[in-house]
């Protein structure tokens, strides 16, 4: 659990140091802008931006029942963040598995990626797709697909 918060905490602390330095140098406007940038980076890299994660077995069970894709991800992954942001509200329709919290999820990702924990790995109808285009993933959610 704590591992997921390391990068956001480092970004927030680094931002605080930069902001403090800018305030001491007499640049409150630059300090405010810097603070916003660091806080935005920290929030984007936090587990809060992603829908609630479930275990790999539960995600696979739910996917079999409703046909929705399963996304294996980890906090701090740039490609996972890109996928999440580009999916927008439709991201909540997917089943998300944080591989840092779920050893079975990490094992499933390694099994389909030559032993590597390459994320995002999206499983659609039992077929894994490593780092797919977000538009393609959105198409998999449409009723006609």
Image (cartoon, grey):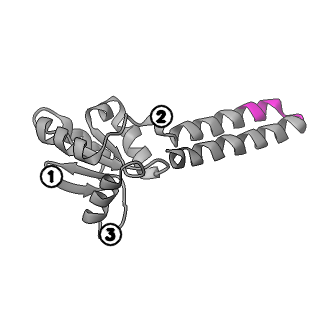
Are discs 2 and 1 less than 8 Å apart at CB?
no
Classify 35 as above or below 133: above
Q: CA distance from mark 3 to mark 1?
A: 18 Å
Residue 41: x and y, percent?
A: 58, 41
Residue at position x 14%, y 35% from top? Answer: 66
Is residue 131 something that shows in the picture? no
Classify 77 as above or below 52: below
For this view, does 61 lie left or right of residue 134? left
How dense is the environment of label 3, judged by Cα within 10 Å: few (below 14), some, or many (20 and up)? Answer: few
Residue carrying label 2: 48
| Quarter of the image with the C terminus in it | top left
Q: Secondary structure at mark 1?
A: loop
Query: What's the magenta region?
Result: 25-32
Classify 94 as above or below 104: above
Residue at position x 27%, y 39% from top? Answer: 95
The residue most toward the right is: 25
Which secondary structure class fits the magenta region best? Answer: helix
How dense is the environment of label 1, judged by Cα within 10 Å: few (below 14), some, or many (20 and up)? Answer: few
Of pointers 3 and 2, the one earlier in the residue sequence: 2
Residue 48: x and y, percent?
A: 47, 34
Q: Quadrant of residue 54?
A: top left
Is residue 64 something that shows in the picture? yes
Residue 17: x and y, percent?
A: 78, 43
The residue most toward the bottom is: 114
Of pointers 3 and 1, the one earlier in the residue sequence: 3
Residue carrying label 3: 115
Residue at position x 51%, y 40% from top? Answer: 46
Nearest to the observer: residue 4 or residue 20: 4
Q: Secondary structure at mark 2?
A: helix
Residue carrying label 1: 126
Q: CA distance from mark 3 to mark 2?
A: 28 Å
Q: Secondary structure at mark 3?
A: loop
């Amino acid at each position: 659990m704590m591992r997921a918060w390391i990068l956001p905490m480092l970004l927030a602390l680094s931002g605080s140091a930069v902001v403090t330095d800018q305030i001491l140098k007499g640049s409150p406007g630059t300090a405010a802008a810097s603070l916003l940038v660091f806080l935005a980076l920290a929030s984007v890299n936090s587990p809060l931006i992603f829908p609630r994660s479930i275990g790999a077995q539960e995600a696979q069970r739910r996917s079999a029942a409703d046909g929705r894709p399963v996304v294996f991800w980890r906090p701090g992954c740039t490609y996972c963040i890109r996928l999440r942001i580009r999916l927008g509200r439709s991201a909540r329709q997917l089943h998300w598995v944080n591989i840092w919290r779920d050893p079975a999820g990490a094992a499933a990702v390694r099994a389909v990626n030559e032993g590597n924990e390459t994320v995002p790995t999206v499983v659609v109808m039992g077929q894994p797709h490593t780092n797919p285009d977000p538009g393609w993933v959105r198409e998999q959610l449409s009723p006609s697909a």
